[in-house]
Amino acid sequence: MAERIGIEELSKNISDHHLLTRQESREIVRELFEQIRQAMVQGKSVQLQNFGIFRTVTKPAGMVMDPRTGTKIHRDERISVSVRLTHLFLDRLIYDI
């Protein structure tokens, strides 16, 4: 399983590369995620240049199969988050791996 990186480590990396304290970089990272969240709550999509697009998608209600029991159950309508990465970001990611 891949190693995870959290807000604290992102903040540390930003403060190490720029002239910011860890507290300042932590606030910037948290505010970035909060702005993305608020825009999505309002139904807007968020496009980050050379990274990707975040948007909410409404999944319709319907019948789905329970993977444990194999029985069909009703699933209510729900809201999901979709992230579509740009080709540039994916190419750089694959190159660096």
Image (tube, grey):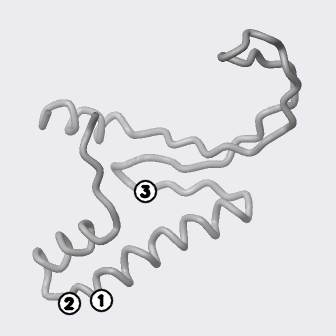
State if disc 2 and disc 1 touch (CB < 8 Å). Answer: yes
Residue drawn where x is 24% and y is 32% of the image: 91
Residue 64 vertical placement versus 18 (above, below): above
Q: Residues within 10 Å of mark 1 (few under 14, many from 20)?
A: few
Q: Position of residue 18 (x, y in %)?
A: 14, 80
From the image, tell me which residue sits under label 1.
24
From the image, tell me which residue sits under label 2.
21
Residue drawn where x is 24% and y is 45% of the image: 3
- CA gap, disc 3 and disc 2: 25 Å
Nearer to the camera, 70 or 36: 70
Amino acid, disc 2: Thr
Q: Residue 48 carries which label?
A: 3
Nearer to the camera, 27 or 76: 76
The secondary element bearing badge 2 is classed as loop
Q: Which mark is residue 51?
A: none
Viewer-nearest of labels 3 and 2? 2
